Image (cartoon, helix red, strand yellow):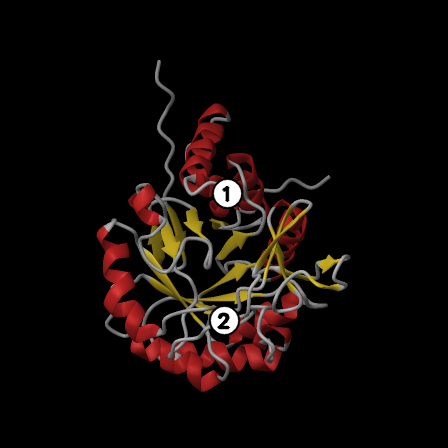
């Protein structure tokens, strides 16, 4: 007898998705270069690599360095700029059937707003505000509640689409920052970006990455992400969260949903296995069927107390 079909659809506020698995920004390319290796229409959405109003060269090489349980990156948000992305990358990505979340960044609040305004007619489903990249030698907006509120408000005022604020775990009180993002108009949150780290080449006595420090991602940060999602969703009930950080398997996705996430981002796993999001989704569905979970929505925030 075939296993009962699991309802994989989720709702993140007014954003309805057919499944809870999305790709994390910066891990699935700008366009269809990774998406064409699978069927992204099966995924909830593909979050494209963050883009700014103008092209940006990013950090000097080397940009990636393997860590004991993940990797450090200091890519530095290299990108073609919004106009080039709209002309050359988005059409090919949409042609694969992907629902697209555009991730925007800027050096200033005005640049965030301008990038968003340039996306006004784009065929996308939401905007992610990347206010938390640790790989730029400039102010990280999501380390300060006032700056977070200001940049989210600027993006919200420039679009009619749902807005998700991607926040940093590298703060003392993440709930304070999350509340500021919601006060600024965020419809939801992406938790979390990478954890600040440093790799050293003992032979040269220099940092292993061209940009100096970098962002640690992968399995090592899953406990950090789970704690962040659990803490924030308990403090801000009803605010939808895309839980991202160290998700490698369907069970990881279950844990992220139980912590309070409404959807799950798969990131670093894509570098090793471009089909990882599809496998995670299949494993999640299988887990639900085996545990008599009729809908993945039943899992969100259902972590039992000790």
Q: Position of residue 289 (x, y in %)?
A: 44, 27
Identity of the residue furthest to the top in this view = 1
Who's the residue at 40% across and 59% down the image? 13
Residue 231 against residue 249 in the figure, above or below: below
- Image mark for residue 58: 2
Locate residue 125: give its quadrant. Answer: bottom left
Q: Residue at x 27, y 75 (%)?
A: 120
- Secondary structure beneath dot 2 equals loop
Residue 58 position, x and y percent, is 50, 71
Hey, which quadrant is residue 5 in on the image?
Answer: top left
Apparent side of residue 264 relative to residue 54 in the rendered image (left or right): right
Depth check, front residue: 298 or 162: 162
Provide residue 121's location: percent of width, then percent of height: 23, 72
* Lower position in the chain sequence, tag 2 or tag 1: 2
**Image height of 113 relative to 59, above or below:** below
Q: Residue at x 60, y 80 (%)?
A: 139
Evaluate if marks 2 and 1 touch, with contact meaning CB atoms under 8 Å apart. no
The answer to whether residue 119 of the structure is visible from this angle is no
Give how far across and how far down residue 211 sits, in percent: 61, 69
Query: To which residue does mark 1 refer?
Result: 272
């Amino acid at each position: 007898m075939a296993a009962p079909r699991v309802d994989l659809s989720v709702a993140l506020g007014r954003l309805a998705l057919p499944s809870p698995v999305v790709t994390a920004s910066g891990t699935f390319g700008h366009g269809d270069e990774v998406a064409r290796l699978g069927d992204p229409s099966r995924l909830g959405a593909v979050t494209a690599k963050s883009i700014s109003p103008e092209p940006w060269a990013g950090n000097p090489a080397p940009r990636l360095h393997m860590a004991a349980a993940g990797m450090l990156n200091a890519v530095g948000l290299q990108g073609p700029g919004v106009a080039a992305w709209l002309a050359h990358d988005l059409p090919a990505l949409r042609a694969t059937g992907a629902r697209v979340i555009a991730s925007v960044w800027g050096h200033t609040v005005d640049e965030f707003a301008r990038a968003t305004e340039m996306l006004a007619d784009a065929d996308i489903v939401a905007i992610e505000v990347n206010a938390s990249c640790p790989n730029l030698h400039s102010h990280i907006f999501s380390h300060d509640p006032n700056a977070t509120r200001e940049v989210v408000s600027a993006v919200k005022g420039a679009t009619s689409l749902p807005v998700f604020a991607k926040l940093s775990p590298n703060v003392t009180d993440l709930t304070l920052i999350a509340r500021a993002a919601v006060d600024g108009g965020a419809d939801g949150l992406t938790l979390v970006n990478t954890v600040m780290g440093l790799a050293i080449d003992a032979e040269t006595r220099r940092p292993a990455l061209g940009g100096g420090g970098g962002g640690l991602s992968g399995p090592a940060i899953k406990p950090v992400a789970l704690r962040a999602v659990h803490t924030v969703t308990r403090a801000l009930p009803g605010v939808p969260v895309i839980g991202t950080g160290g998700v490698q398997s369907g069970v990881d996705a279950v844990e992220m949903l139980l912590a309070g996430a409404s959807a799950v981002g798969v990131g670093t796993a894509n570098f090793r296995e471009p089909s990882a999001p599809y496998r995670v989704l299949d494993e999640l569905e299988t887990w639900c069927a085996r545990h008599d979970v009729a809908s993945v929505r039943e899992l969100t925030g259902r972590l039992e107390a000790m």
